[in-house]
Image: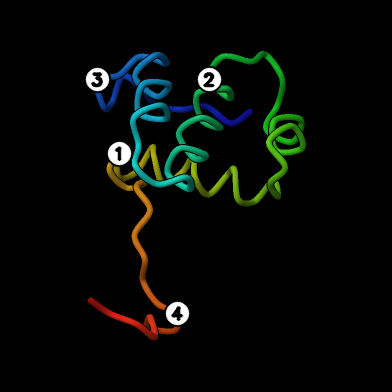
């Protein structure tokens, strides 16, 4: 069963929910909310992945990333793609 190591980062499940509500980017909000729900539900990771509309491996990757590197590792960073046509 997939577990989050909240104690390692001195957090409680409500901290994940607060991060989800206050994150500036939608992808960051989605990640924290999914992990919050995973910490609250008695269901397994596959049921939670279906519920949030993500592939199981994605949810597992987010959980491992959190457990290994902490909450700051879940913050979305734009790393590529086509540069904007118009700039300021």
Residue 9, by quadrant, is top left
Instruction: Find residue 39 and name its label.
Output: 2
**How far apart are the alpha carbons under marks 3 and 4?**
35 Å
Q: Is residue 57 left or right of residue 82?
A: right
Q: Is residue 81 left or right of residue 57?
A: left
In this figure, which residue is indicated by the disc labeled 4?
A: 81
Residue nearer the viewer, 49 or 22 = 22
Residue nearer the viewer, 73 or 3 = 73
Which is in the foreground here, disc 3 or disc 4? 4
**Residue 85 drawn at (x, y percent):** 39, 86
> What residue sits 34% from the left and 19% below the top?
15
**How far apart are the alpha carbons under marks 2 and 1?**
15 Å
Query: What element does badge 2 sit on?
Result: helix
Residue nearer the viewer, 35 or 64 = 35
Residue 83, by quadrant, is bottom left
Rate crowding at label 1 as few (under 14), some (14 to 19) or many (20 or more) other CA atoms within 10 Å.
Answer: some
Q: Earlier in the sequence, mark 1 or mark 3?
A: 3
Contact, CB < 8 Å: mark 2 with mark 4? no
Which is in the foreground here, disc 1 or disc 4? 4
Image quadrant holding the C terminus, namely: bottom left
Rate crowding at label 4 as few (under 14), some (14 to 19) or many (20 or more) other CA atoms within 10 Å.
Answer: few
**Residue 53 drawn at (x, y percent):** 72, 42
Instruction: Find residue 10 and name its label.
Output: 3
Q: Is residue 42 above or below residue 49?
A: above
Image quadrant holding the N terminus, namely: top right
């Amino acid at each position: 069963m997939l577990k989050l190591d909240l104690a390692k980062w001195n957090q409680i499940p409500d901290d994940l929910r607060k991060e989800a509500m206050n994150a500036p980017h939608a992808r960051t909000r989605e990640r924290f909310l999914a992990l919050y729900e995973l910490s609250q539900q008695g269901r397994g990771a596959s049921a939670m992945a279906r519920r949030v509309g993500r592939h199981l491996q994605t949810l597992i990757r987010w959980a491992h990333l959190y457990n290994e590197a902490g909450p700051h590792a879940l913050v979305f960073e734009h790393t590529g793609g086509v540069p904007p046509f118009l700039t300021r």
